[in-house]
């Protein structure tokens, strides 16, 4: 393999160059495995980033007991497991709608199905927004960009970004509340 030399390196290597090579060669594999493990694109993005940060920090600790790909996937698996086990993940839920059941060790098929339907409904609503509103909502919610970063990227004022973000959130809330009224469900707050 082309990364066999890593097991003999103890220092003095350009970590940035090696990291770029590893990301190019195995980045998609790491992301796919994280997605497979979590079934969440957002979490797969975060986990992949964390994996390569760990690889950068631990590059000189690679002992060559396995292939580089196996090592990366092991780090990915452990990182994904840590995220799923974390107290933060268990407490945080989609828009505050769901609260974990402390007596249940794993969600029932009915609950998983319900959560999937709710997620699809929310994304369906977001995707129906006009592009300008959808764009700021995704940049803020998914990518975590600040108001200034969004304004710079979109080449508009911060006030415009704030206005669009407010209108996007209000439109999603209105749509979900309207849907809840039509189906007799509890209102989204």
Image (spheres, rainbow, N blue to C red):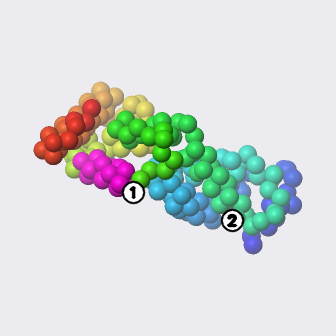
Estimate the x, y position of residue 73 in percent, counting from the top left: 65, 60
Say which of 37 and 22 sits in front.
37
Estimate the x, y position of residue 139 in percent, counting from the top left: 38, 42
Q: Residue furthest front?
A: 103
Mark 1: secondary structure: helix
Mark closer to the observer (1, 2): 1
Q: Quadrant of the N terminus?
A: bottom right
Reading the image, the residue beneath label 1 is 109
Q: Residue furthest top?
A: 159
Measure the C-alpha gap from mark 1 to mark 2: 33 Å
Q: Quadrant of the C terminus?
A: top left
Q: Is residue 22 magenta?
A: no
Reading the image, the residue beneath label 2 is 69
The stretch in magenta equals 110-125
Q: Residue at x 48, y 36 (%)?
A: 91
Say which of 94 and 9 sits in front.
94
| Quadrant housing residue 186 | top left
In the rendered structure, which disc, 1 or 2, sits on the residue that comes first in sequence?
Answer: 2
Mark 2 closeness class: few <14, some 14–19, many ≥20 residues within 10 Å:
some
* Residue 134 as seen in the image, left or right of residue 140: left
Estimate the x, y position of residue 127 in percent, counting from the top left: 26, 51
| Quadrant housing residue 17 | bottom right
Estimate the x, y position of residue 87 in percent, counting from the top left: 55, 36
Contact (CB < 8 A) between labels 1 and 2?
A: no
Say which of 145 and 76 sits in front.
76
Q: Residue at x 59, y 60 (%)?
A: 30
* Residue 180 as seen in the image, left or right of residue 84: left
Q: Do we see residue 14 in this rendering?
A: no
């Amino acid at each position: 393999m082309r990364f066999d030399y890593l097991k003999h390196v103890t220092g003095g290597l350009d970590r940035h160059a090696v990291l770029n090579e590893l990301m190019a060669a195995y980045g998609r594999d790491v992301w796919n495995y994280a997605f497979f493990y979590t079934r969440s694109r957002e979490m797969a993005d975060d986990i992949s980033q964390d994996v390569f940060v760990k690889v950068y920090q631990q590059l000189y600790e690679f002992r060559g007991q396995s292939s580089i790909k196996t090592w990366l996937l092991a780090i990915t698996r452990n990182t994904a497991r840590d995220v799923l086990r974390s107290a933060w993940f268990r407490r945080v839920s989609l828009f505050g709608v769901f609260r974990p059941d402390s007596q249940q060790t794993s969600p029932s098929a009915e609950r998983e199905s319900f959560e999937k339907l709710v997620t699809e409904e929310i994304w369906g609503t977001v995707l129906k927004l006009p592009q300008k509103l959808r764009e700021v909502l995704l940049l803020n919610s998914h990518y975590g960009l600040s108001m200034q970063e969004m304004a710079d990227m979109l080449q508009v004022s911060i006030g415009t970004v704030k206005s669009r973000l407010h209108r996007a959130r209000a439109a999603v809330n209105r749509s979900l509340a309207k849907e809840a009224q039509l189906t007799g469900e509890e209102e989204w707050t």
